[in-house]
């Protein structure tokens, strides 16, 4: 039998969940509950997906060609073992101000950088940061970044 998340045949068995899923040991461990790794730093509690929705997200994050879970924004290989790693698999809301779903699996450092920005805003800010950090920094990018961050 194949794992319903990663298609592995290694130690796959029918797991006690509702509805039952055939999962390998790795995916069973990950599928138990969503992890936003937000450390609740004075923030309001955020909604997390239901268990079956979480498993479907894990299926989408699994890259069969590379044999790994990957970040849905950066496409880098995620670390599933070290919770302190910046590459650890995290749950993120594509639009954090609204608790209406829109979940995705991302690297912990991406989740921390994105913080309260919606996905479109984040995609706009990252290239501006690259331009500002470059040597020499682009003055037009500095002004645009300052303007964008005022409205954040």
Image (spheres, rainbow, N blue to C red):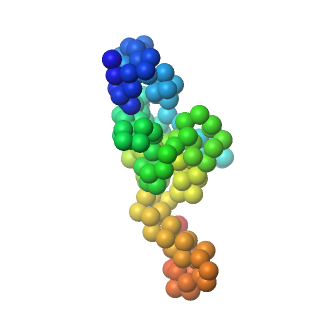
Residue 59: image location, x then y, percent: 37, 35
Q: Residue at x 54, y 72 (%)?
A: 130
Q: Residue at x 46, y 55 (%)?
A: 74
Residue 81: image location, x then y, percent: 59, 34
Residue 82: image location, x then y, percent: 63, 37
| Residue with the most extreme bottom position | 139
Answer with left or right where residue 10 lies relative to residue 135.
left
Q: How many marks?
A: 0
Residue 113: image location, x then y, percent: 57, 57
Q: Is residue 16 above or below residue 34?
A: above
Q: Which one is nearer the viewer's eye here, 91 or 24?
A: 24
Observer able to see residue 21: no
Q: Is residue 116 above or below residue 18?
A: below
Q: Is residue 48 above or below residue 92?
A: above
Determine which quarter of the picture holds residue 88: top right
Observer able to see residue 20: yes
Determine which quarter of the picture holds residue 20: top left
Q: Residue at x 36, y 41 (%)?
A: 65
Q: Which one is nearer the viewer's eye here, 54 or 132?
A: 132
Determine which quarter of the picture holds residue 58: top left
Quadrant containing the N terminus in the rendered view: top left
Q: Residue at x 55, y 84 (%)?
A: 138
């Amino acid at each position: 039998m194949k794992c319903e998340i990663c298609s592995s045949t290694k130690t796959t068995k029918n797991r006690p969940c509702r509805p039952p899923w055939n999962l390998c040991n790795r995916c069973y461990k990950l599928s138990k509950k969503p992890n936003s790794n937000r450390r609740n730093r004075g923030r309001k509690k955020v909604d997390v997906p239901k268990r079956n929705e979480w498993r479907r997200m894990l299926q989408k994050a699994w890259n069969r060609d590379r044999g790994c879970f990957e970040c849905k924004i950066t496409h880098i290989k995620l670390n599933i073992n070290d919770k302190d790693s910046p590459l650890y698999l995290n749950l993120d809301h594509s639009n954090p101000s609204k608790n209406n779903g829109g979940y995705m699996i991302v690297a912990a450092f991406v989740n921390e950088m994105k913080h309260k920005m919606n996905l479109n805003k984040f995609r706009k800010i990252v290239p501006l940061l690259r331009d500002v950090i470059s040597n020499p920094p682009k003055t037009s990018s500095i002004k645009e970044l300052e303007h964008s961050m005022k409205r954040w």
